[in-house]
């Protein structure tokens, strides 16, 4: 158990009466007493062997070593607070004493109350200074351990603390970059908000990229962090290059699909369709001569004509599904009008189209047409809707198509399945190929909205 909770005091005083007074007074305050010592040599020995918590040191001592020199030697081995005692404050002694950084002074004569106050202040001051030193050491350790460069600087660029050796920001950065940094710091000081910027530096090899972050400490100072973000920038560049390659590949793949569909549609239309039409004309010519044909044969010819009509209709349907020729001949707006009428005729669901006159290149037109086509297919299969609205418009530099129905909407597991379904994935794939996006929103009983956006300017490969 510690009998002296306030700690031990080494009393160094060469006047016996005053030394006894001091010892009694500090004991009454609850301190333990080490000493007293009457000479500088004895003071050094007691300080190093007894490890006091504070020293009351008379400046003028008997012998060759005064209190200031004794304290200097003690401080070489131990960090202990000292209160100097002096009968007179001559300038030379005061200057020498300042070099020791004492925690207090007491001018003789003094009373017990003054002594107690001086001891309390000295201990508190020493504790705070020790904590500040430890805090500075921890901060310095963090500075040195951090892979980033950390600075404490003023608005004029002066570095007050730094993890690198420099006194001004101009010593770290080229003039053009330093000017940008100072502007960033000024903005941080003015607004109080965290500020960020990036800059690059060219070296012997490739350029390196850095991030600068400023955080205000007070009205005049900021803490700044310089971070090497070259790897991040390189990874981002590679990701963008990969995305561009993907978009180019997706565009090429979609174009190849559409070219194949177009070729098949024209082949079916031109070859099979014309053959069927020619056959129908021949049958019609035969059926028009009643003298050459019996009633039974006439009936069979009529049945064959009806079958050919159905085949011609199916061929037209197949060619339209493969590639509606109206899309190539008249463009996206006309193709959507045909799609709207065909959907309404096939499903019985009321369908309306609102469209702006927008000039669209064939690639984007095809992508948007297929997205609307897939959205209408989903409405027919799942929505249980009675009304559908298709909208085509230009929104700034983007082409936007929207398919809105008044059906049952997306609910529970069905909504999750739709988000992962092949139809939506196909729509998104077509939009992403042109640097765009597809969103699907809806709620129970309030229908579903499919919205697709693509930039009208070339993005990612083809124009």
Image (cartoon, rainbow, N blue to C red):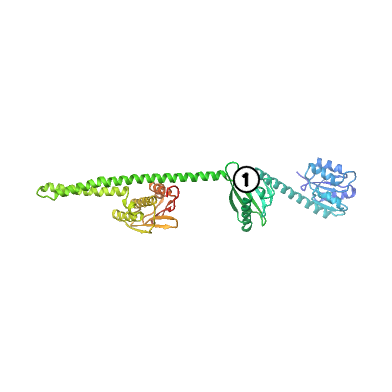
Apparent side of residue 11 relative to residue 160 in the rendered image (left or right): right
Q: Percent from the top left, x then y, of residue 21?
A: 87, 50
Which sits in the foreground, 332 or 1? Answer: 332
Figure quadrant of the N terminus: top right
Category of crowding for the residue at label 1, using alpha-carbon neighbours closer than 10 angstroms: few (below 14), some (14–19), many (at least 20): some
Which sits in the foreground, 377 or 53? Answer: 377
Apparent side of residue 331 relative to residue 247 in the rendered image (left or right): left
Which sits in the foreground, 153 or 133? Answer: 153
Query: To which residue does mark 1 refer?
Result: 148
Q: Percent from the top left, x then y, of residue 225?
A: 62, 49
Residue 419 visible, this angle: no
- Mark 1 element type: loop
Apparent side of residue 322 relative to residue 15 in the rendered image (left or right): left
Residue at image location 24% in from the left, 47% down from the top: 274
Residue 233 visible, this angle: yes
Which sits in the foreground, 376 or 63? Answer: 376
Instruction: Point out the residue furthest to the left here.
Output: 291
Q: Percent from the top left, x then y, of residue 285?
A: 15, 49
Apparent side of residue 409 relative to residue 310 in the rendered image (left or right): right
Q: Percent from the top left, x then y, of residue 205?
A: 58, 41
Image position of 145 with respect to 325: above or below: above
**So how many labels did they put on this image?**
1
């Amino acid at each position: 158990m510690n009998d002296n909770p306030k700690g031990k005091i080494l009393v160094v005083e060469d006047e016996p009466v005053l030394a006894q007074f001091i010892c009694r007074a500090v004991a009454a305050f609850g301190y333990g007493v080490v000493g007293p010592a009457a000479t500088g040599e004895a003071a050094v020995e007691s300080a190093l062997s007894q490890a006091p918590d504070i020293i009351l040191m008379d400046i003028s001592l008997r012998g060759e070593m005064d209190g200031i020199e004794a304290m200097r030697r003690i401080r070489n081995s131990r960090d202990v607070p000292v209160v100097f005692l002096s009968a007179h404050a001559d300038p030379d002694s005061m200057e020498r004493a300042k070099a020791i950084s004492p925690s207090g002074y007491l001018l003789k004569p003094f009373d017990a109350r003054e002594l107690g106050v001086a001891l309390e202040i000295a201990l508190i001051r020493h504790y705070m200074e020790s904590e500040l030193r430890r805090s500075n050491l921890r901060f310095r350790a963090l500075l040195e351990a951090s892979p980033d460069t950390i600075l404490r600087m003023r608005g004029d660029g002066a570095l007050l603390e730094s993890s690198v050796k420099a006194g001004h920001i101009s010593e770290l950065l080229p003039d053009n970059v330093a000017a940008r940094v100072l502007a960033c710091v000024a903005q941080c000081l003015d607004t109080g908000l965290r500020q960020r910027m990036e800059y690059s530096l060219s070296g012997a090899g490739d350029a390196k990229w850095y991030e600068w972050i400023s955080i205000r400490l007070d009205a005049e100072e900021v803490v700044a962090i310089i971070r090497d973000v070259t790897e991040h920038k390189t990874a981002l560049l590679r990701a963008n290059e990969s995305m561009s390659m993907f978009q180019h590949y997706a565009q090429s793949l979609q174009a190849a699909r559409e070219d194949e569909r177009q070729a098949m549609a024209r082949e079916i239309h031109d070859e099979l369709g014309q053959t069927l039409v020619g056959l129908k004309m021949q049958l019609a010519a035969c059926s028009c001569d009643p003298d050459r044909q019996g009633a039974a044969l006439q009936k069979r010819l009529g049945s064959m004509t009806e079958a050919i009509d159905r085949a011609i209709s199916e061929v037209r349907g197949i060619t339209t599904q493969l590639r509606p020729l109206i899309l190539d001949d008249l463009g996206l707006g006309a193709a959507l009008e045909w799609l709207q009428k065909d959907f309404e005729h096939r499903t019985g669901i009321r369908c309306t189209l609102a469209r702006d006159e927008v000039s669209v290149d064939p690639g984007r037109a095809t992508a948007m047409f297929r997205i609307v086509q897939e959205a209408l297919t989903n409405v027919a299969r799942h929505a249980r809707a009675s009304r559908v609205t298709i909208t085509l418009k230009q929104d700034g530099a983007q082409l936007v198509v929207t398919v809105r129905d008044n059906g049952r909407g997306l609910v529970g597991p069905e909504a999750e399945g739709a988000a992962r379904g092949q139809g939506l994935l196909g729509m998104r794939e077509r939009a992403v190929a042109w640097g765009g996006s597809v969103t699907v929103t809806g709620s129970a009983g309030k229908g579903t909205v499919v919205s697709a956006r693509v930039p009208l300017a070339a993005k990612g490969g083809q124009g």
